[in-house]
């Protein structure tokens, strides 16, 4: 049933397209085209040395008699590492971010300064902070080992980023150090929108602060919190720079992005690496779609 | 039996004192209205009673017990906020029940209390609605319901009707009056609306810049204002204030001079001021009659406002002083008319140069 559009509406639609066009063209060039090429390469046996001789091989990079990605235990290990890293780091960041946001939401002298200072770790480029922590966590010359030894908390140097039992925790620690402030900022924005009179009403009613937090604050900032968690999760799922700088291509911390890079660059397997990148894209796309559906159904509930 | 006693209550924010020693006794069942212009400290005073702000000095007792150091929940008060302060994510029932959960009440007790309050406030059909699905008046009733279920010793209202439109405000005013008759609870009510103050209060407290200007029954304050501030704050349009000079006095009457005009007014037992003292004369618009038989003060009509049931005539006297007169029905005068006015003798109030009423 086509409704007759008013002239004004048609004019407005036309204007909207004109404004959208530059963005759509740029997106198609910088995101669409590389994405389509990557997906195409994933169906070929392309090699970094002889790109022009690439042949179409169907799904063999994914699943084949000689072993596709889906049969590679290293791939599944990197999937597991990515999920583990995302869940643990985002959870810790959410809890810490919430605590920091609640503190910054209280009026005190110098709050503006503290608010700005908290953002410093987030403002430093990841590659810089990862290098910085790499040095600080260095097993022989690192300041962390030095301080812990002086305090007699450890007896000998600890290989924070090389020890398979510690490396993932080290990576999580640095990620938490870096992104808690971002999480705090997003939550703080949610907290500042809360009606202050509700809290006075709760004080008059004699409701304990803990109950106020769980029954009033948390439900009210839930939408902001979900957005923050989704943002961070999408970021964490494609984590690359931090892990690559701190632990290179070690299996214990290898994520999907690091795996794809290793195949593509180190092993020169463009087709195989592209298949890994395509899978990573599909996983993140699926996760985004799921959260969009979930948040939309939540929104329509209310 | 809930009395609230304030003794020399002071409040400072930093070095800045905003409440300058308020003494006030609120008897059981009183409906006390704190009224004053914005920034006069009336809301601060209410928040001091509620315990939402710390009292800097002085003593506050509720039911004979000093409560200065008690948190709001231990003072036996319930408060209704200007912006309703409902929990946006809870429905009407949960909003009213939330405060009771802390008081160790059983589920059945809570339900009985909430249902009872809802019935009283005609909210029963809306118990499962969220605040945003309610109209302003309904939200305000939920806020009142939340106060009622706590069965407080003292109800505190902070400008509860100022967010409602005019029609609803009148209706809610009547409901509040009925509620107070039914519950007979001690109430402290803050407003800047003098109609609310006049109609609801058993006792009005007029505040100005952190000081109590006058305490009394509504008509007492209206008829016998203690000073020019109170005289001009209550009443719309406000009481006319004309600077005059004292003349001679005899037989309890004082001659008043304003430019060339001389007239006399009863002293009503006050000590006659010395001749030549600068005074202020107050007269309400309804006590000025235009072109009465014995009218003697000349004036010129500057503006006429027809309000329907009455009209206002803005007059200019030869001395330059302005007067507003209220007359019944539609005005027959027009702008520019020369008239003579009569001031009702017994309604003339005299104030000294500082604005304090001359009293017996």
Image: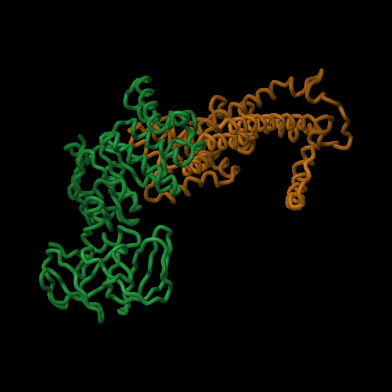
Q: Which of the pair B100/B294 is nearer the observer? A: B294
B202 lies left or right of A276: left
Quick check: can you spot residue A159? Answer: no
The extreme front residue here reads B293
Figure quadrant of residue B64: top left
What residue is drawn where x is 40% and y is 73%? B302
Q: Residue B250 in the image: x percent, y percent?
A: 11, 73
The extreme top residue here reads A65
Q: Which chain is green?
A: B
The extreme bottom residue here reads B260
A227 lies left or right of B312: right
Q: Residue A293 in the image: x percent, y percent?
A: 65, 30
Figure quadrant of residue B264: bottom left
Q: Residue B319 in the image: x percent, y percent?
A: 30, 79
Q: Residue A187 in the image: x percent, y percent?
A: 50, 39
Q: Which of the pair B49/A102 is nearer the observer? A: B49
Q: Which of the pair A179/B270 is nearer the observer? A: B270
Give the drawing colour for chain A: orange
What residue is drawn where x is 40% and y is 76%? B337
Quadrant containing the C terminus of chain B in the rendered view: bottom left
- Name the image colouring: by chain
Quick check: can you spot residue B313? Answer: yes
Quadrant containing the N terminus of chain B in the rendered view: top left
Q: Which of the pair B13/A56 is nearer the observer? A: B13
Q: In the picture shown, does residue A201 fall above or below B35? A: above
What residue is drawn where x is 25% and y is 73%? B243
Q: In the picture shown, does residue A276 fall above or below A197? A: above
């Amino acid at each position: 049933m086509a409704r007759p559009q008013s002239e004004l509406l048609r004019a407005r639609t036309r204007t909207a397209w004109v404004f959208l066009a530059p963005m759509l063209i740029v997106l198609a060039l910088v995101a669409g085209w590389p994405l389509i090429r990557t997906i195409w390469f994933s169906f070929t046996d392309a090699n970094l040395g002889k790109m022009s001789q690439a042949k179409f091989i169907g799904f063999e990079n994914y699943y084949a008699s000689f072993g596709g990605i889906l049969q590679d235990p290293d791939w599944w290990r990197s999937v597991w590492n990515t999920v583990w890293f995302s869940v643990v780091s985002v959870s810790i960041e959410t809890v810490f971010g919430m605590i920091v946001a609640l503190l910054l939401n209280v009026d005190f002298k110098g709050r503006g300064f503290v608010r700005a200072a908290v953002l410093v770790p987030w403002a430093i480029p990841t590659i810089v902070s990862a290098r910085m922590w790499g040095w600080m966590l260095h097993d022989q010359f690192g300041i962390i080992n030095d301080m812990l030894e002086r305090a007699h908390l450890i007896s000998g140097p600890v290989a924070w980023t090389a020890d398979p039992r510690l490396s993932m925790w080290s990576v999580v620690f640095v990620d938490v150090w870096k992104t808690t402030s971002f999480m705090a900022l997003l939550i703080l924005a949610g907290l500042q929108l809360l009606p202050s009179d509700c809290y006075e009403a709760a004080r008059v009613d004699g409701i304990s602060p803990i109950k106020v937090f769980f029954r009033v604050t948390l439900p009210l900032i839930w939408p902001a919190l979900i957005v923050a968690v989704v943002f961070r999760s999408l970021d964490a799922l494609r984590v690359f720079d931090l892990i690559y700088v701190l632990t290179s291509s070690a299996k214990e911390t290898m994520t999907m992005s690091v795996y794809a890079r290793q195949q593509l660059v180190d092993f020169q397997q463009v087709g195989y690496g592209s298949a890994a990148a395509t899978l990573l894209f599909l996983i993140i796309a699926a996760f985004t779609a799921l959260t969009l559906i979930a948040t939309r159904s939540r929104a329509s509930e209310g | 039996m809930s009395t609230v006693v304030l003794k020399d209550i002071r409040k400072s924010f930093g070095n800045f004192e905003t409440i300058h020693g308020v003494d006030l006794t609120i008897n059981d069942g009183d409906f006390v209205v704190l009224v004053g212009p914005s920034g006069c400290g009336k809301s601060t005073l209410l928040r001091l009673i509620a315990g939402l702000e710390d009292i800097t000095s002085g003593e506050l007792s509720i039911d004979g017990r000093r409560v200065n150091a008690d948190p709001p929940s231990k003072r036996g008060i319930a408060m209704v906020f200007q912006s309703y302060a409902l929990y946006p994510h809870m429905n009407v029932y949960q909003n009213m029940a939330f405060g009771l959960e802390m008081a160790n009440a059983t589920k059945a007790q809570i339900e009985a209390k909430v249902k009872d309050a809802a019935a009283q406030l005609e909210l029963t059909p809306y118990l499962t609605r969220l605040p945003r699905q309610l109209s302003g008046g309904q939200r305000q009733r939920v806020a009142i319901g939340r106060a009622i279920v706590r069965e407080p010793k003292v109800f505190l209202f902070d400008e509860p009707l100022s967010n409602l439109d005019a029609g609803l405000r009148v209706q809610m005013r009547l409901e509040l009056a009925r509620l107070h008759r039914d519950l007979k609870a001690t109430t402290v009510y803050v407003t800047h609306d003098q109609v609310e103050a006049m109609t609801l209060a058993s006792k009005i407290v007029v505040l100005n810049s952190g000081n109590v200007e006058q305490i009394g029954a509504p008509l007492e304050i209206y008829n016998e204002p203690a000073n020019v501030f109170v005289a001009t704050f209550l009443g719309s349009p406000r009481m006319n204030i004309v600077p005059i000079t004292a003349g001679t006095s005899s037989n309890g009457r004082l001659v008043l001079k304003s430019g060339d005009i001389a007239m006399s007014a009863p002293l009503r037992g006050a000590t006659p001021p010395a001749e030549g003292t600068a005074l202020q004369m107050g007269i309400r618009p309804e006590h000025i009659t235009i072109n009465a038989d014995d009218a003697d003060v000349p004036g010129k009509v500057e503006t006429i406002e027809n309000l329907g049931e009455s009209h206002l005539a803005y007059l200019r006297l030869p001395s330059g002083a302005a007067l507003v007169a209220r007359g019944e029905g539609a005005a027959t005068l027009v702008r520019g008319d020369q008239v003579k006015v009569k001031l009702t003798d017994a309604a003339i109030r005299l104030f000294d140069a500082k604005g304090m009423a001359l009293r017996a």
